[in-house]
Amino acid sequence: MTAVLGIALFLASADAAHPSWMVGTWGRQNKGEQHVDCGSDHDTTYHRDGRYTFLDTSGTWRIEGDRLIETMTDPGGSEIPANVGKSSIIQFKRISRDVLEVTGEYPGRLIKCPGH
């Protein structure tokens, strides 16, 4: 019984950290711009299993409250290998099903790309 409860708690925490609404491909809209980078190589794809891909880099992601936390695991050829294992934190406010208002150092929006 204890093992079943432990598994249920683990699965519940995994869903909270990787909500289905975040799974898919998201484009960036910088503050003051009308254009969204959907369909470009600057999209970030968040996978259900907690992985993300951006350009030729990849890593893990999770949601903690109003923060999206990305941790690089593979720098590809475009990032500095020293960044592996470092986390970036994106503070956001979810303003609709497919739009996150990003605050902090790089304000703007993340917008879920159509069909993703």
Image: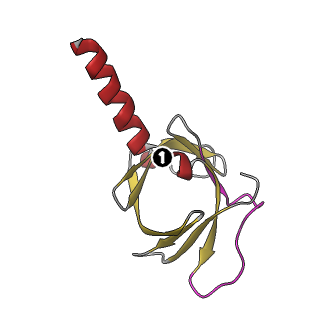
Span colored in magenta: 31-46
| Quarter of the image where the N terminus is located | top left
Q: Quadrant of residue 48?
A: top right
Residue located 49% across and 45% down the image: 81
Q: Quadrant of residue 39?
A: bottom right
Report the residue that reaches farthest toward the front. Answer: 1
Residue located 56% across and 44% down the image: 52
* Lateral position of residue 7 relative to residue 40, left or right: left
Number of numbered discs: 1
Q: Is residue 89 above or below residue 28?
A: above
Q: Quadrant of residue 91?
A: bottom left
Q: Secondary structure at mark 1?
A: loop
Is residue 40 or residue 85 the one in the foreground? 40
Residue 9: x percent and y percent?
30, 29
Residue 34: x percent and y percent?
69, 83
Q: Which residue is mark 1?
A: 19
Residue 75 in sight here: no
* Lateral position of residue 2 relative to residue 43, left or right: left
Residue located 49% across and 38% down the image: 50
Mark 1 is surrounded, within 10 Å at the Cα level, by few (under 14), some (14 to 19) or many (20 or more) other residues, namely some
* Lateral position of residue 64 relative to residue 103, left or right: left
- State yes or no: residue 92 in magenta: no
Q: Is residue 21 above or below residue 103?
A: above
Residue type beneath disc 1:
Pro
